[in-house]
Amino acid sequence: MQVENKEFKPTIVAFCCNWCSYAGADLAGTGRMQYPANVKIIRVPCSCRVNPTFILRAFQRGADGVIMCGCHPGDCHYTSGNYYARRRMTMLFDFLDYLGIEKGRTRVEWVSAAEGARFASVMNEFVKNVTELGPNKRITDLRCKMEKEGE
Amino acid sequence: MKKVLDIMQKRAKQLLGEGIVNRVIGWKTGEFGYDQTPAVFTSAAELSSLVYDSFSAPNLSKYLIEETKKEGKALVFLKPCDTYSFNQLIKEHRIDREKVFVIGVECSGKVDINSLKSRGAVGVIGVEDNGEKVIAHTLYGDMEFAKDDVLLEKCRSCKGKQHMVFDELIIVNPVKEEKNDRFIGVDALDAMTPDERFEFWRGQLLKCIRCNACRNVCPACSCIKCVFDNQNSGVASKASPDTFEEQMYHVIRAFHVAGRCTDCGECTRVCPQDIPLHLLNRKLIKDMNAFYGEYQAGTDTDSRAPLTNYTKEDVEPNVISDKGGDK
């Protein structure tokens, strides 16, 4: 009998605003700061672009955690996008918690283009938290999981 | 109630006769005596089948979206809670106010046929509400019930007896205002652990057969093209091969009506599987009240809903993950 000894490596989806955290991620990269490779970055034009469906879709397709990064309140490239996103995500994440989905799997962080080190530390911390929570079982699509494993 | 119905019929006939309106939207008896369905009446003769009793629960506001696209003015009868939906639809520019003549009718709470049935009423042909008791007329004689036992969920947590908008009012017996805490169910769930909540919602949402009745009846769910009708969405199927579909459907539906839901309770009323859908909407209402100040959708036609507004001092989303509790 073969004993599987696979270390759990969570899949993290990070929605990053083009004007701040995406550049922050870039800065972390050029500054050679370490952050886990299992963070998959999706660039969005503004944190306000992130539709609640995106978050659920990420979980459906096998994400174990979803983090949304935007400009610090007051610094939005489009003046007020992140203010709307802030309300929307507060409501959505509390709602997911209400349905019993672990609240450690969702997070919002404000990271500016100059904060490469902060981007790396936020990602390190988030990946650590999600690794402790284990694989996402509560809001996932079995069919997608089979597809993923079949690859 | 009989008296109210007489006045309603008389006034509707009068307005039709004068040519002020060319059709009337009300209720008529469907297949069964307890099955009061929305109907359009265009002549005085047809109006004799207009009914209004304790089974006339359907919210007529949503029908006005289509009706106000037609020629001429429509007369509509709205109960107090329906007027919130009506206001909300005006705010969203879905109803042309000029084309509607609103008559507000009194309401003392509507009766849930399923509660009657589960309490042993068989062959119900009618119902009467004498203020304290509900008397169900059945093929086998009359049965008496305590009112609180047989009211619909939306009526047990009534928002109030005031009409938010009307052209005329028909009130014969003013009903006493009773304020109930509508968040009791939500509070109970909030007090549970995440695991218990997950088990509760999984059990409830697994029952969903995706008949889309909650969406179709919802006055806030009035998109011309719904995201769940998209075959490519992966969550458009009727049967549910995976629990994710129900989660996705109900989360997105509740979230899409957040801030616009007037808590009219129609979703819970029409659900054939008895899923307490109001608990989803009320959670969002409770959160919005707690985070962004008291707000009731539909009280007016010009205020901004919490999710289409912001202040610079809003709470940070991480209050959720930081609020303690496990996980």
Image (cartoon, coloured by chain):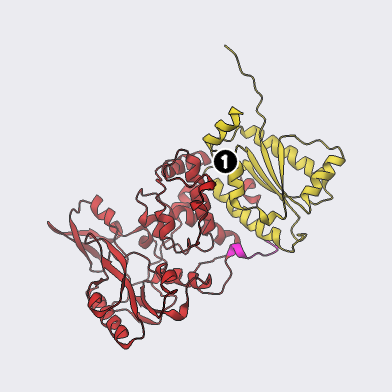
Category of crowding for the residue at label 1, using alpha-carbon neighbours closer than 10 angstroms: few (below 14), some (14–19), many (at least 20) = many
- Residue B104, given in percent of the width and then of the height, sits at 36, 77
Using the image, name the chain to which the residue with label 1 belongs: A
Q: Nearer the viewer, residue B275 or B221?
A: B221
Which residue, given by chain and number where applicable, does mark 1 sit on? A60
Disc 1 residue type?
A: Gln
Q: Which residues are magenta?
A: B306-316
Q: Is residue B167 above or below residue A110?
A: below
Check if residue B127 falls in the magenta segment: no
Residue at the far left in the pictured view: B140
Report which colour depicts chain A: yellow
- Residue B289, given in percent of the width and then of the height, sits at 55, 61
Q: Is residue B23 above or below residue B130?
A: below
Q: Chain drawn red, letter?
A: B
* Residue drawn 56% across the image and 74% down it: B302
* Residue drawn 55% across the image and 31% down it: A146
- The quadrant holding residue A88 is bottom right
Is residue B92 toward the left or the right of residue A45 in the image? left
